[in-house]
Amino acid sequence: MTLRFDKLGVVIAAIVAYAAFAAPFATFRANRIVPGQARPVLEALPPTLDMLLLAIVIVGGVIALLRTPLIFRLAASVVALAALAMLIGISGSFLTPAGNTFARVAPASGFWLLIFAFTLLLADVLTRLDLSPLARVGVLAGAALAIGALLVSGSWDSLSILKEYASRADSFWAEGSKHITLALGSLAVAVVAGIPLGILCHRVEPLRAGVLNVLNIIQTIPSIALFGLLIAPLGWVASHVPGAAAVGIRGIGTAPAFVALFLYSLLPVVANTVVGLAGVPRAANDAARGMGMTDRQRLFDVEFPLAFPVILTGIRIVLVQNIGLATIAALIGGGGFGVFVFQGVGQTAMDLVLLGALPTVALAFAAAIILDAVIEMTSTSRRAEPA
């Protein structure tokens, strides 16, 4: 019998082999800022559990390597990810000396590589299964519930990132609220302003090139530079316009961050609105015109519904983009998860950096999956309507 290898599985198996046997599984530090001591799997976990984890990842790697049925690959990825999630918490408790509140245990490169490898395997399986949009959202919800259960159970409390969170719990949620407000608020304003502007650009062709060129220029300005450029004009507005400072407009803080994110959001919304409307079949417009519809009726009853999936794609781009860019707002006092990122960089505390970076990545990932599902459902319903 000839063994057949999966191309992606070869890469996954190589990553698993390196991560399990050559890379450290956890890092122990005497306190939060001193250099860490790398610990491999056999030293980072209690006896029997270390061998159990190695057995799970080896079997998972072999299943990924060979062309096995999808159900086996799904089971291998889920079991491996669950084992890694539970055992990293046990590693934290195992490596931390009893009664020591200064020691820090963090996942090392081997752990993250194993997470990456089996997440890649899981994503490949889910892609091959061709799940419906609602099923993909359900998988996301299940993963979120599992992670939430581990956090609530206290299984990860011995890990350094959770110790950083414990000392900053109130500020974490306050900054998280600011981060979401910046990302969603700037998106909402961009949608309100950008869709009518996109419709206008579609209808008035001489206006289109000028508007899109200006928005393209704004998009090319580096985010930190744009935040800085807005400090002076907004500071002037706060000083000279009555009531401006009272509503929160000032040279630093939330206002310049919000304006910058709004400006970055305009191009995808306007451009996708123009592209979506331009892609409406001429036959649909001709049929609507033949039925006696006015321009307004054709726009809202025919053109806009057909263009909506494309417009929604632009909104998805903006939301994911803004969640990431809102991190930079901390540099000008705008708050958000970037506060922890830059505090961690300044203190050489990687766990504090992760406290800000991981929620940002998780929010962007969840937003992308949810909006992708909405776009697919919307596109499917539009295609089904004529039939």
Image (cartoon, helix red, strand yellow):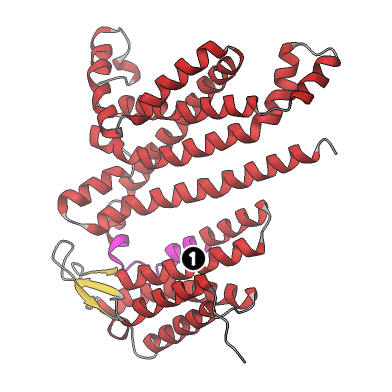
Residue drawn at (57%, 47%) of the image: 370
The quarter of the picture where residue 152 lies is bottom left
User: How far from the left and from the top, in percent, is residue 150?
Assistant: 45, 66
The quarter of the picture where residue 253 lies is top left
Q: Is residue 132 left or right of residue 34?
A: right
- Say which residue label 1 marks: 120
The magenta-colored residue range is 146-162
Q: Kindly report the secondary structure that dominates the magenta region of the rendered protein.
A: helix
Residue drawn at (83%, 21%) of the image: 287
Q: Is residue 178 left or right of residue 383?
A: left
Quadrant occupied by the N terminus: bottom right
Q: Is residue 326 above or below residue 56?
A: above
Q: Nearer the viewer, residue 15 or 97?
A: 15
Q: Is residue 156 magenta?
A: yes
Quadrant occupied by the C terminus: top right
User: How far from the left and from the top, in percent, is residue 181?
Assistant: 42, 34
Q: Nearer the viewer, residue 289 or 225?
A: 289
Residue drawn at (20%, 57%) of the image: 349
Q: Is residue 380 left or right of residue 255?
A: right
User: Can you name the residue that lies furthest to the front here?
Assistant: 2
Residue 258 seen in the figure = no
Q: Is residue 167 magenta?
A: no
The quarter of the picture where residue 247 lies is top left
User: How far from the left and from the top, in percent, is residue 10?
Assistant: 47, 75
Q: Give the SS element for disc 1.
A: helix
User: How far from the left and from the top, in percent, is residue 104?
Assistant: 23, 68
Q: Nearer the viewer, residue 204 or 61?
A: 204
Tag 1: Cα neighbours inside 10 Å, few (<14), some, or many (≥20)? some
Amino acid identity at mark 1: Leu
Q: Is residue 291 above or below residue 36?
A: above
Q: Is residue 355 above or below residue 126?
A: above
Residue 386 seen in the figure = yes
